[in-house]
Amino acid sequence: MNITDAIRNTKRAVIPYVTAGLPDMETTGKIVRALSDAGAAAIEIGIPFSDPMADGPVLQKASKTSLDAGFKMDALFEHLPAWSAEVKCPLIVMSYINPLMHRGLEPTLKRLKTSGISGVIIPDEPSDAADLFNMTRSAGLDLIRLVAPTTALERKKEVISQCSGFIYAVSVKGVTGARKALPDEVKSQVGEIRKITDLPVCVGFGVSSKEQVDEILGFADGVIIGSYLMERIMTASNPPDEAARLISNLIG
């Protein structure tokens, strides 16, 4: 099932984010399987990076902890085929551009596809991502792009024209991280995006409670849960069980 269909065919489309290699690669695999079994519409797998400019304190700490524990891209590629074969939903890789370019962008995208990945999210992609969009589509991957609250209308149209899978509507100004309240303009932001595209629109950044998930799913097609999940994974005695419990509650 592709990403668009997975979101449209899931009654409450919750998309969790998990940092790869935290606390180790074997446990990441168990978390991914637990999230799928709990009913996730798709799962984002974050590649740890030393300069995660779009990430807030929780995801920065998750990246650093994984890198300090010895995360390697080669190890991720060794595990991805098994993870993708064992889950019921599409897997999406979230990475900054440098880790993807280290071995060459085009071969890395093709290897992600053959490893079972369905799409990529690259927060620091170039402003004109037409070439990157064509490259991902040629590799058989979706390129999911972020639209911020500050993105002007004409720029929104350009970004969305170079996007597939779903539109990632950033709910807040700034980096990732749980917030107690979401901005009032999120609903109107999603409505404006819907006028431009037929792709699903999913909201991420700042989501930290079931009440916020319920509110977002009232006007958007899906919701992405990152920092709120990773904060609990990093302190849990049994990370896979905690991840499954939290996502099951949010989907509830």
Image (cartoon, rainbow, N blue to C red):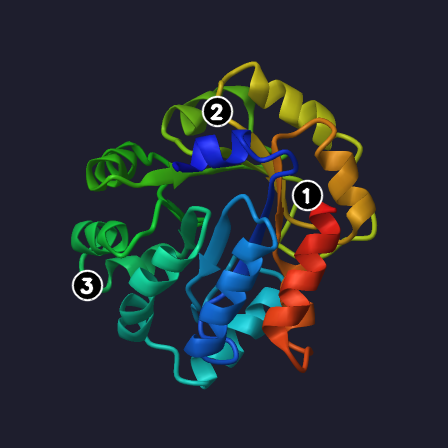
- Residue extending farthest to the top is 195
> Which residue lies under the disc numbered 2?
199
User: In the depicted view, which residue is nearer to us: 183 or 143?
Assistant: 143
Relative image position of residue 127 (x, y in whole percent): 38, 38
Question: Which of these two is toward me, 55 or 110?
Answer: 110
- Pinpoint residue 35: horizontal percent, then vertical percent: 56, 58
Q: Earlier in the sequence, mark 2 or mark 1?
A: 1
Tell me which residue sits at (77%, 39%) in the image.
214
Mark 3 or mark 2, earlier in chain: 3
Q: Nearer the viewer, mark 2 or mark 1?
A: 2
Q: From the viewer's perspective, is the residue at label 3 or at label 2 nearer? A: 2
Q: Amino acid at mark 3?
A: Arg
Vertical placement of 2 versus 33: above or below? above
Of the 4 image quadrants, the one containing the N terminus is top left
Label 2 is placed on what type of residue? Leu
Where is mark 1, residue-wise? 172
Please name the residue shown 48% across and 53% down the image: 44
Relative side of 85 to 108, left or right: right
**Circle 1 — which element?**
loop
Q: Which residue is mark 3?
A: 103
